[in-house]
Amino acid sequence: MEMAQAEKKRFFIPLLIVGTMFFAIGFALGINSYLIPLLNQSLQISSGQSYLVIAATFSAFLIFGYPASLVIGKIGYKKTMALSFLMFALGFYLFIPSAKMGSLPLFLLASFISGMGNAFLQASVNPYITILGPIESAAKRMSIMGICNKLAWPISPLFLSLVISKSVKDVQLTDINLPFSIIIAVFLLLGVLAFYAPLPEVKAAGEDSGSSEDCPYAAGKTSILQFPHLLLGVLSLFLYVGVETISLGTLVDYATSLKLPNPDLYAWIAPVGMVVGYIFGVTLIPKYISQSKALIIFSSIAIIGSLMVVFTPPMISIYFVSLMALGCSLMWPSLWPLAMADLGKFTKAGSSLMVIAIVGGAVIPTIYGFMKDAFGGQNAYWVAIPCFLFIFYYALSGHKIRN
């Protein structure tokens, strides 16, 4: 009992610090849900074109997922976290001249650079929190981080609305200058705090030695491609990030298309559903339910939720996005430990593949955007159903496949 208490105390400060970083990730991504309808009306572009902002953000994961793991190997988790905040600040700074010039390509560049910061930060914090304690309770720690992350998504459009003090339909592009200046200052401060934070460097079992005693399954492997449970997990994560981004990032746009009053307030629907799921994870994993069982249950909920979104009347369907989001909630906390299990000396390489998979947030929402142009906002949510079905397969049996 005393040892368990000592362990909790030892991990409390790192969890608190990394939780702040997960909040920053969510805040940065939540900005897109405000920018999409703003660019749509200000630049007079299609929905598909406006969703390229999300694509630009997440495409950075494809390019920088592996380099980020190399940087972590050279300078460690903590310094990489600090570096990522500098990248964020640079990307946010570029939004100011983008607004002044009314340039979509410059907006996309700004989104890409902030996405680069996100890629480096995600590559640091996700494996860090996974191996900061027993692998069996990793989903519980990830659920706590998820609460920090998802509560931040609706806070960023709310923050932008409060500082600008105008309805989305009345906002001019240059109105974003003041809130983005504040955001830049905060992220620079977070970079300094990350650099000096008391975060211990951590390693997974067998990561250094690769001995059969530390991690017998990984000891005889010569390539990361010899871990089918990881590769299927990477594909699952790719699909999951895409559909989660749709559930979190499309609500303001969907509410606007439905001509609902105060559309920016609808950004809260999905995060509330996700936080409910995370509380479930924190409370029940691993004491009462395993990570794989949680993934089976919540992928089923996501399938039901997405069917309700496409089949119910439009004014009601928007509220069922919260059920999609509830289903998404325990996917990230469960997929990471299931895919990263028994990688041993390949842990950092496996982590880089998982981070690259976050590019799903670029691909799936862009498909949604062009489907919205072609078939309408409600029918565009059909894209989520096959994604959730594959994740259900991974939860049921895909994560058990071993060479």
Image: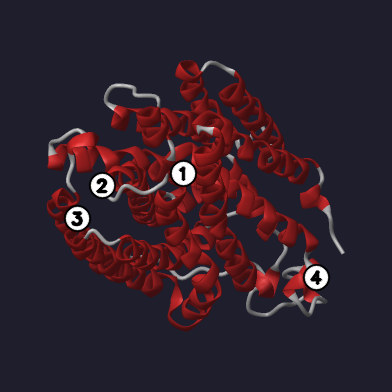
Residue drawn at 46 percent across, 71 percent down: 201
Q: Marks 2 and 3: in contact by CB < 8 Å? A: no
For marks 4 and 1, the one nearer the N-term is 1
Quarter of the image where one finds residue 206? bottom right
Helix, strand or loop at label 3? It is helix
Helix, strand or loop at label 1? It is helix
For marks 1 and 3, the one nearer the N-term is 1
Q: Which amino acid does the dot numbered 3 rest on?
A: Phe
Q: Which residue is more in the foreground, 233 or 306?
A: 306
Local crowd size for mark 1, using a 10 Å CA cut-off: few (<14), some (14–19), many (≥20): many
In the picture of the structure, the residue carrying the numbered disc 1 is: 146
- Viewer-nearest of discs 3 and 4: 3
Local crowd size for mark 4, using a 10 Å CA cut-off: few (<14), some (14–19), many (≥20): some
In the picture of the structure, the residue carrying the numbered disc 4 is: 226
Cα–Cα gap, marks 4 and 1: 30 Å
Helix, strand or loop at label 2? It is helix
In the picture of the structure, the residue carrying the numbered disc 3 is: 180
Determine which of the numbered discs, if any, sits on residue 42 in the image: 2
For marks 4 and 2, the one nearer the N-term is 2
Cα–Cα gap, marks 3 and 4: 45 Å
Q: Which residue is more in the foreground, 330 or 363?
A: 363
- Viewer-nearest of discs 4 and 2: 2
Local crowd size for mark 2, using a 10 Å CA cut-off: few (<14), some (14–19), many (≥20): some
- Viewer-nearest of discs 1 and 3: 3
Local crowd size for mark 3, using a 10 Å CA cut-off: few (<14), some (14–19), many (≥20): some
Residue drawn at 72 percent across, 63 percent down: 342
Seen in the image, is 238 located left or right of residue 181?
right
Determine which of the numbered discs, if any, sits on residue 185 in the image: none
Q: Which residue is more in the foreground, 277 or 30?
A: 30
